[in-house]
Amino acid sequence: MALAHAEQQAATCLAFSPDGKKLAIGTQIGEVAILNLESRTVEGRWHTEKWAVFGITWTPDSRDVVAACANGLLKRFCADCGSLRTTFDTWEADGTPNQNLGGHADRNLWDAFVTRDGSTMLTGGWNGTTRLWNLTTGKMTQAFPDVERSTQGVKFTPDERHIVTNGLMSDSAIVRTADTFKVRARLDAKGRDIAVHPDGQLIAAATVHEVYLFRLNLSDPSDEQTTEYQELVDQVADPDEQVHTTATKKLKSIGLPADSILEQASRNAEGEALVRIKQIQAEIESPMPIATLSGHSSELRQV
């Protein structure tokens, strides 16, 4: 064991600083402890209020910590001195009065993730939505309440071109583009967390007792590939069974890079061709997992 650290109350979440020198610890009693990994001492302990800290993250420069709290607020602290820089308020963002000063389940926040340039924060919570915030002003810039509920795991892909989210009461884990917010994939898993591999192609989505691994190609096709995919889509409409069956199999193996071509084709297709295109779209937008990690005896909270 390299290091052991005990908190007075339950430690609920952990995050290493990007420079690898410190560990931020959130607790059940609403504290954030900053552990210096070299000296193995707590060099700071900051109070968010009395509500539990369920999610914690750092700004890319390792200077600040953001705590996601059970009272519907996110607090951005200076990691060195503990001064409060910004408060992000889901009650205010929704125009909803906080009648009970942060009841546990009505505005729980569970997770937060900051982009590499330090400009944008992605959050999820039991408040019924995934949110994007301006990290400097503290203002919410986007929310997705209609398609996501009780979001508890949020991530950007490594290239930050896609947002990946998971929620215990959602219909599925969701992958959407970060610029247009278009949903590109729905993964058949719903639970408390989600993780993205550094290569951006493997996504681990937790359910209550299992973790499913999905492989997704989220890259944009080249001009040459776009031409190839268009030819395959045209062949899907071919009356010859061997031709359209072969084209269908190829498009399914290509996966999401062909989704925009298929979407365009679906607007003009009709009859049997439209049915085939819709079937291909449904399969590539909801891929089957490539592996299942099971055998957990209790509820999964993090992956």
Image (cartoon, rainbow, N blue to C red):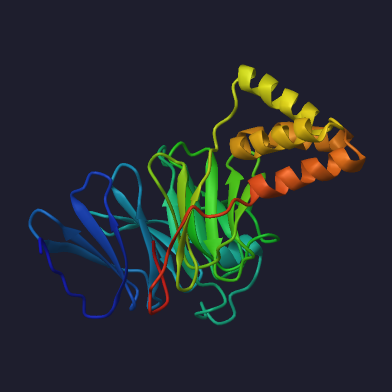
Q: Residue 64's x, y, as percent?
A: 32, 51
**How many numbered marks does the figure carry?**
0
Q: Can residue 30 be seen in this view?
A: yes
267 horizontally vs 93: left or right: right
* In the image, farthest residue toward the right: 271
Considering the image in quadrants, where does the C terminus appear?
Answer: bottom left
Near-viewer residue (73 or 143) = 143
Q: Residue 43's x, y, as percent?
A: 15, 61
Considering the image in quadrants, where does the N terminus appear?
Answer: bottom left
Residue drawn at x 66%, y 65% is 95
Q: Residue 38's x, y, as percent?
A: 9, 53
Which quarter of the picture shows residue 199?
top left
Residue drawn at x 53%, y 79% is 105
210 horizontally vs 16: left or right: right
122 horizontally vs 35: left or right: right
Q: Is residue 89 visible?
A: no
- Note whether 95 is above or below 60 in the view shown: below
- Note whether 84 is above or below 69 in the view shown: above
Residue drawn at x 52%, y 55% is 289
Residue drawn at x 67%, y 48% is 283
Q: Residue 76's x, y, as percent?
A: 38, 57
Near-viewer residue (300 or 23) = 300
Near-viewer residue (113 or 255) = 255
* In the image, farthest residue toward the top: 224
